[in-house]
Amino acid sequence: ETVPVLLVAGLRWMAAGVLLGTILLAMGRRLPPARLWGALILLGVLMNVMGNGFVVFAQQYVASGLTAVLIATTPFWSALLERLLPNGDRFSTRSLVGLTIGFSGIVILVWPEMSRGGASGRAFVGGVLAIQLACVGWVIGTSYAKRHERGDNPFPSAALQMIFSGVMLLTA
């Protein structure tokens, strides 16, 4: 089941990137220079392959509504990453309390399914972990994008990022 799902996701990313790139080129826009392709490939891995590909994988084992709730952990990962970076933001007592309450609520929501034994319980836990990896990938990608050049126009950069992501998902 996983292979067709990732294959479809890869084809969609690739088609979207090619379509957007074709439209932009027809409008006279240029693609980003090759020196920026490494950053776009990295963003494709973090945000599209990890951030979306892992969610696509997890959806085989975790219900959509619960997936949406689990994606709500993204701010926790974002706050932690920003704290760990040089000159990162310190946590205030208020923010720590808020993060703790929010994270506790998510654990309460998923605990009954996670504590179920057997193969379906293990598959569910694997899906939950994949969703958390997706959140981490998205947060790292977002933080990287804020701090690194991706070109002067976001649309050509997005087109290449989608093409690279599609190739990587098809390869996976």
Image (tube, rainbow, N blue to C red):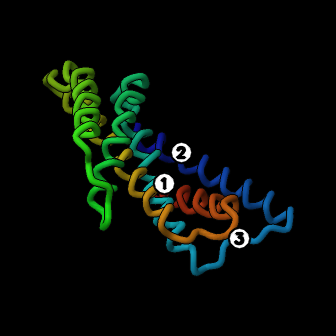
- In the image, which disc is placed on residue 9? 2
Q: Which amino acid type is shown beneath numbered disc 2? A: Ala
- In the image, which disc is placed on residue 169? 1
Q: Nearer the viewer, residue 42 or 166?
A: 42
Crowd tier of the residue under label 3, counting other residues whose Cα lies within 10 Å: few below 14, some 14–19, many 20 or above: some
Q: Nearer the viewer, residue 3 or 96?
A: 96
Marks 2 and 1 sit apart, C-alpha to C-alpha, by 7 Å
Give the x, y percent position of residue 59.
Answer: 40, 32
Give the x, y percent position of residue 94.
Answer: 26, 37
Q: Nearer the viewer, residue 22 or 134?
A: 134
Residue 153 in sight here: yes
- Residue under numbered circle 3: 31
Which residue is depicted at the point 39% across and 29% down?
A: 67
**Marks 2 & 1, CB-CB < 8 Å contact:** yes
Q: Is residue 107 above or below residue 27?
A: above
Q: Secondary structure at mark 3?
A: loop
**Marks 3 & 1, CB-CB < 8 Å contact:** no
